[in-house]
Amino acid sequence: MNHSELNYLKLLRTILNRNNRVESRNGTVLNSFGEKLVFDLKDGFPLLTTKKVGNKTILRELLWFIKGSTNNKELQEKKVHIWDQNSSKEFLESRNLNYKEGDLGPIYGFQWRHFGAEYKDCYTDYKGLGVDQLQNIIDLIKNDPSSRRIIMSAWNPLDIDKMALPPCHVLCQFHVDTIQGTIDCQLYQRSGDMFLGVPFNIASYSFLLCIICHLTYYKPGKLIHILGDCHIYEDHIIAVKQQLLRVPVQYPTLDVSEKLDSIDDIKEEYFTLENYKSYPKLVAPMIA
């Protein structure tokens, strides 16, 4: 029985039944605050099965973050369009940003790899500038695995107004169990679109955990997902109700190639998902 996905579905049902309607920044939502989901990766890679989820899109976005890029045109070249609305000239101007279309400002990748550097544009070379939080995490796991400071933050108050969109998944902390030989990741997400966004976030941070484990010679443990404001958009309710009629099946497994030996040299072909079985995809509008 796929208990973790059942718990995700249970949370969807709880939010629907609570029927706490709120007029938010971008539409009417049903919401709940302060929830928790746990995914044990020894049970498989948590790519939801009650609807088809685009794992290649998730991986390509994550590798873009890891590269430190904030240029949406690089994603578009790989047929990933999840940031198109937020990088349009019209949207950037609504945020009082004067970037060229496609420049998202100092979002996730910049904060992960260059925290504290001065952001100019998505074309500038920031090599050696700011704090490379991601490399620091890997170094800490290798050299001081008992540290309680293995943390990466995307929330930089000095840069929030320079971002096309403030980060939703804002902080993650890694815990190393040297006896079991595993690493857990606890993610804090301030805002979660439960139908479209959260399934992506679950898989994305699971990919990240697997990458970090591979580079530090540990096994993936648990992804503990803490959610602040979890919400279902009114326009997603019909699709959510369809999903709730489905029974989850076994998760796929992820194979990571031995060729992966550096955080700065990761290729999409290094990852193989095996035995991914899912119900058909469910369509709902992406709300920026």
Image: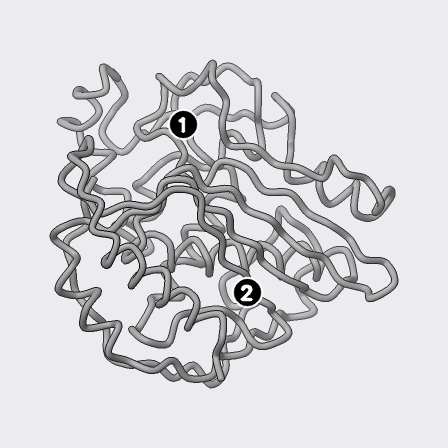
Any mark on residue 199, and which? Answer: none
Question: What's the residue type where badge 2 is placed?
Answer: Phe
Q: Is residue 243 above or below residue 75?
A: below
- Residue lying farthest front? 18
Residue position for label 1: 123
> Which quadrant of the structure image shows residue 153?
top right
> Colour scheme of this structure image?
one colour
Question: What's the residue type where badge 1 is placed?
Answer: Tyr
The residue carrying pointer 1 sits among few (fewer than 14), some (14 to 19) or many (20 or more) residues within 10 Å by Cα, namely few
> Which quadrant of the structure image shows residue 122?
top left
Looking at the image, which residue is at 23% across and 57% down? 16
Looking at the image, which residue is at 51% across and 68% down? 269
- Name the element at disc 2: strand
Residue 208, how many percent across, how many down? 57, 54
User: Which residue is at the front of the view, 93 or 269?
Assistant: 93
Q: Is residue 106 above or below residue 208?
A: above
Mark 1 and mark 2 lie on one chain; the one further toward the N terminus is: 2
Q: Is residue 41 above or below residue 224?
A: below
Residue position for label 2: 39
User: Which residue is at the front of the view, 198 or 238?
Assistant: 238
Residue 125, how many percent across, how many down? 51, 26
| Cα–Cα span, label 1 and label 2 | 37 Å
